[in-house]
Image (cartoon, rainbow, N blue to C red):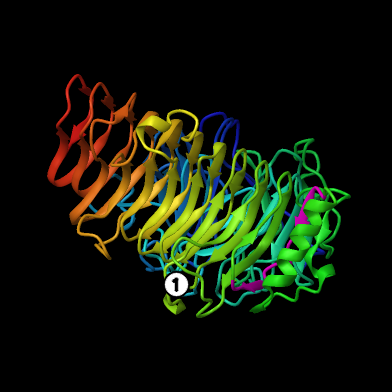
């Protein structure tokens, strides 16, 4: 039996002069996605193929599909990405699929959708799935990758938690690769692009002298790594969906002497492995300043004065960018204000409020200037060591806040105040007694539209452990809340914590669209999407997925569109206290 699009299937041994033979397999078909796994538990990786939910697995490891010996499963459908791992730690890899943050894992290896299929929510639209044994406990865990940012479910809880690990490793447009590059039992990260590999050999998640550059592959082909020989280390391989080049001896050279006339023209001999630092992720403007040039050490001590002085200098000299020291911690004791029209290049640097800083309720950790772009930074409010409840980060007009982490802030974690055209995208927001993301205007109903926050985009953020509300929308207009993953905690300081709240006790909201969010709750006491009163107008709540919430959607306003939502609930699915609302196509279970 041949797989779709395959003329023949065979393997060819390499030159007998090599101590370990490389392999050339034909397994798959045109349009197929190559997959790999230890299907039979022999400690070696075998090849496989996936297309439109159908899996073909080379169970006996001979590189050819044999009916009755190899395995065929139906699991998934068109639009899903295949994932493979030893989900339960029994020594055999099992299949799974991923789409837009939703994972479906064949936990017991049954090869079919059953009651034992494990369902997880981790990631969002635009993020690529990655899997590995991050902590060497014998079980495969999940993770996601986008551009240079990795989020890894380190302990295997299957959801965002305080144990989720964040790495910055890669380039925009590069493909993630995972492997045990040094044989210590832990899966480490890497990236691949058209035959060039950068692998995090020592597993620290950052670029340094241990980062290894390898050359192996063919332009346009897919990386498919594995421990092909069972020696405990990951070797490289590439496939175009049906042709596989497997570097069995790990020397970075693919050569099969007995099949020169059979090898496809696209296959080539690749130069040996070499070590180098990877290319720069993005170009840094020539007018940039580096905080290390201002004496900043990033050792966690209070460097408030030095940091503010450097930012003031950037503003006074029209610097285009401020470069923070990679993976350092800068301690502060009062509000830091960045200038307008500047890019803050975080490099994984943490801004941390020192213990007993003296900052009060209403103060903010960091204010981002107008027309600014902040990315790859961390903001730690150190809330358990403060004497009051200061806020976190505030964004001014036309600012962009992406790929950052804000955590351990007592009150408002990340907010807008009378700001317009603000983008909040792809951040992790977690651990506060009050609010995760909050938009705000001023002056009540009469303030519309001048003192409202307008055109705010809140997309693809991961939000959890926010004691009162994950996303609070207040005095805001013409804004989008889309693709966020929100985990509502068991009550911390509020009797009914909520995922998203349309807050209107001191002013209304207009033209808010809430769509394609994933909100999960603890069950009793939680509300997924809620509202206060009729001052919300032009509201759309569509195509959200809500799980394990006490109350799904509470509507205290009129003339809204509530459609296409999937809700599992404890006490109420949709509570409609308004009039003229369009409520249709929702699923309540």
**Is 473 placed left or right of 360 in the picture?**
left
- Count of numbered tags: 1
User: Image quadrant for the C terminus?
Assistant: top left
Query: Is 428 one of the magenta-colored residues?
Result: no
Q: Is residue 331 above or below residue 105?
A: below
Can residue 47 be spotted in the picture? no
Query: Is 331 one of the magenta-colored residues?
Result: yes
Q: Which residues are magenta?
A: 319-333
Q: Residue 573: image x %, image y %?
A: 16, 39
Q: Nearer the viewer, residue 248 or 150?
A: 150
Can residue 349 be spotted in the picture? yes
**Is 180 placed left or right of 529 in the picture?**
right
Kindly indicate the quadrant of the structure image that contains residue 587. top left
**What residue is pinned by disc 1?**
383
Q: Residue furthest right?
A: 286
Q: Residue 49: image x %, image y %?
A: 51, 42
Q: Residue 145: image x %, image y %?
A: 57, 51
Kindly indicate the quadrant of the structure image that contains residue 532. top left
């Amino acid at each position: 039996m041949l797989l779709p699009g395959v003329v023949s299937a065979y393997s060819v041994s390499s030159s007998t002069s090599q101590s370990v033979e490389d392999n050339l397999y034909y397994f798959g078909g045109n349009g197929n996605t190559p997959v790999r796994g230890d299907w039979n538990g022999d400690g070696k990786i075998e090849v496989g193929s996936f297309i439109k939910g159908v899996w073909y697995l080379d169970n006996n490891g001979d590189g050819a599909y044999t009916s009755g010996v190899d395995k065929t499963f139906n699991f998934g459908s068109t639009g899903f990405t295949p994932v493979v791992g030893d989900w339960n730690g029994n020594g055999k890899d099992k299949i799974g699929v991923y789409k837009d943050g939703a994972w479906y894992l064949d936990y017991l290896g049954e090869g079919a959708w059953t009651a034992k299929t494990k369902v997880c929510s981790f990631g969002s639209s635009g993020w690529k799935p990655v899997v590995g044994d991050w902590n060497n406990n014998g079980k495969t865990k999940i993770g996601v990758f986008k551009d240079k940012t990795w989020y890894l479910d380190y302990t295997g809880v299957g959801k965002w938690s305080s144990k989720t690990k964040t790495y910055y490793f890669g380039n925009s447009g590069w493909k993630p690769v995972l492997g045990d590059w040094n044989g210590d039992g832990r899966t480490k990260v890497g990236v691949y692009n058209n035959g060039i590999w950068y692998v995090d050999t020592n597993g620290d998640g950052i670029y340094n002298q241990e980062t290894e550059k390898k050359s192996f592959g063919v332009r346009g082909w897919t990386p498919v790594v594995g421990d092909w020989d069972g020696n405990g280390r990951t070797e490289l391989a590439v496939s175009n969906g049906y042709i596989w080049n497997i570097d069995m001896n790990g020397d970075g050279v693919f050569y099969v002497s007995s099949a020169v006339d059979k090898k496809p023209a696209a296959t080539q001999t690749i130069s040996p492995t070499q070590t180098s630092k990877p290319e720069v992720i993005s170009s840094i403007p020539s007018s940039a300043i580096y905080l290390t040039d201002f004496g900043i050490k990033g050792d966690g001590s209070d460097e408030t004065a030095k940091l503010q002085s450097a930012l003031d200098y950037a503003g006074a000299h029209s610097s285009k960018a401020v470069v923070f020291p990679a993976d350092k911690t800068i301690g502060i004791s009062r509000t830091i204000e960045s200038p307008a029209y500047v890019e803050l290049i975080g490099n994984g640097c943490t801004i941390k409020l020192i213990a007993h800083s003296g900052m009060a309720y209403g103060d903010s950790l960091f204010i981002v200037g107008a027309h600014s772009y902040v990315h790859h930074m961390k903001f730690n409010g150190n809330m358990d060591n403060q004497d009051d409840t200061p806020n976190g980060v505030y964004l001014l007009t036309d600012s962009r806040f992406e790929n950052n982490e804000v955590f351990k802030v007592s009150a408002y974690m990340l907010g807008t105040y009378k700001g317009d055209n603000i983008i909040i995208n792809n951040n992790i927001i977690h651990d506060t007694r009050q609010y995760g993301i909050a938009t705000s205007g001023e002056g009540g109903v009469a303030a519309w539209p001048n003192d409202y926050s307008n055109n705010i985009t809140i997309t693809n953020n991961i939000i959890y452990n926010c004691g009162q509300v994950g996303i609070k929308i207040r005095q805001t207009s013409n804004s989008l809340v889309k693709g966020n993953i929100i985990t509502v905690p068991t009550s911390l300081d509020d009797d009914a914590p909520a995922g998203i709240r349309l807050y209107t006790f001191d002013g209304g909201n207009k033209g808010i669209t809430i769509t394609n969010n994933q909100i999960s709750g603890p069950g009793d006491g939680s509300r997924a999407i809620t509202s206060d009163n009729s001052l919300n107008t032009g509201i759309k709540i569509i195509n959200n997925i809500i799980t394990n919430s006490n109350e799904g959607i509470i509507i205290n306003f009129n003339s809204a569109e509530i459609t296409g939502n999937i809700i599992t609930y404890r006490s109420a699915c949709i509570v409609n206290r308004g009039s003229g609302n369009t409520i249709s196509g929702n699923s309540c279970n």
